[in-house]
Amino acid sequence: MVSESRSGMSFQTLAIFILVVVVLLFILLVVVFNLIELRQDNTRLITARDEVTTILTDSSEELETLRQQSKTLTEAQTTLKAQLEEAALHQAKTSTDAETAAAKLTEENQELAKQLDVITKAKQVVETELQTIQATTGKQTAEQTKLLKTQQDKIATLTTSLTEAQQQMQTLQKELAAEKAQLEQTAKLAKEAEKKVVEELKLAQTSLEQTQQMQDQLTDARDKSMVLAEELKAKVATVSTELQKSAEQLSEVSAANKNLKTELEQLKTELAEAKKNPPATPKEELQKIIAAEIKAGNTGTAKEFQSMQSTLQALQEQLKAIQSSLQPAPETGADPKQETVEAKEEPAPQ
C-alpha cells in the first residue's frame, strides 16, 4: 500500500509537472510570438521613421530652394521698382525740359509776332505817308524821289525783316511741333515702360505669393512630419519598453523552466531510488520493531508486538476467507494470489 501510495503520488506529481511544463511552454510560445510581432512592428516603425526623415530632408531642400527663389524675386522686385522710379524721374525730367523748351519757343514766337506787328504797323505808316506825299504833291522832286526811294528801301528792309521773322517763326513752329511729337513719343514710351514694369511687378508679387503659399504648405508638412516623428518616437519607446518587459518575462519563464527541470531531475532521481530500494511491507516493519525491542531488552513490549502480529495474521486469514467467499467466479480473470498479497499488506484493525 505504501509503495502504491508513493507510486500514485509520484505519477500525480509527474502529471502536474508535465501540465505545468506544457503551460509554461505555451506561455513561452505566446511570448515568442509577441516578441516576433514586436520586432516586426519595430522594423515597420524604423522604416516609417526613415521615410519621414527622407521627407523632412526633401522638404528642407525644397524649402531652401523656394527661399532662394523668393530672395531672387525680391531682388528682381527691388530692381524693377528702381527702374520704375528711374523711368518716372526721366519722364518727369523730359516733360519738364519739353515744357521749358515749348514755353521758350512760345515766348520767342510771341516776341516775333510782336516784332511782326511793329514792322507791319511801320510799313502801314510809311505807305500812308507815301500816299499822303504823293497826294499832296503831284510832282516829284528830286528830294521827294530821294525820300521816296529812302522810304521804299525802308519798306524793302522791313519786308525782308518781316520775311525772315516769318521764316524764323515757321522754323520755331516746326521745332515746337517736333518737340511736342518727341515729348508725346517719350510719354508714350514711358507709359508703356511703366505698364510693363507694373505687369512685371504683379507677376513678381504673384510668384512671391505662390512661393509664400508653398513655404506655408512646406512648413505645415514639416510640422506634421515632426508630430509624426514624435509619435513614432513614442511608439518606438513603447515597443522598447514592451520588448524589455517581454525579455524580463522570458528570463522569468526561463528561470522557472530551469527550476522545473531541476525538480524533474530530482523526482526522476527519487523515483529511480524508490525503484531500486522498494519499501518494506508492514509485516517486515513489525518484525524489525520486535527485533529491535528484544535487542533493547524490552521483552514485554516485544511480546505485545508479537501478540499483535499473531492477531494481525489471524485477522488476515479471516479476511482472506471472507474475500474468498465474496469473490466471483474465476471467469472474471481475478488473480487469487494477488488478492492474498493485498490482504496480507492491509493493516490489522486496532
Image (cartoon, rainbow, N blue to C red):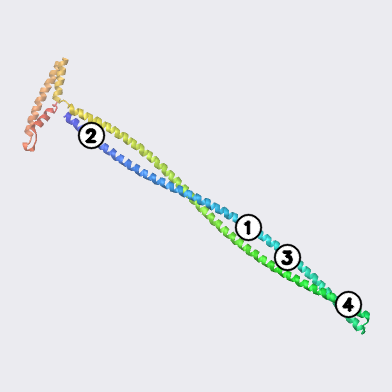
Snapshot quadrant of residue 169: bottom right
- Mark-to-mark CA distance, 4 and 1: 68 Å
Mark 2 or mark 1, earlier in chain? 2
Other-residue count near label 2 (Cα within 10 Å), few / some / many at <14 / 14–19 / ≥20: some
Query: Circles 2 and 1: CB distance less than 8 Å?
Result: no
Query: Which residue has dot 4 on it?
Result: 151
Other-residue count near label 4 (Cα within 10 Å), few / some / many at <14 / 14–19 / ≥20: some
Query: Which residue has dot 2 on it?
Result: 14
Amino acid beneath label 2? Leu
Query: Which residue has dot 1 on it?
Result: 81
Query: Which residue has dot 3 on it?
Result: 99
Q: In this picture, is 46 found above or below 96?
A: above
Q: Position of residue 84 (x, y in %)?
A: 64, 59
Amino acid beneath label 1? Lys
Amino acid beneath label 3? Glu
Question: Which residue is rendered at x = 69% and y = 62% of the image?
Answer: 92
| Mark nearer the viewer, 2 or 1 | 1
Q: Position of residue 46 (x, y in %)?
A: 41, 45
Query: Circles 4 and 3: CB distance less than 8 Å?
Result: no
Left or right, 258 with respect to 43, comes to: left
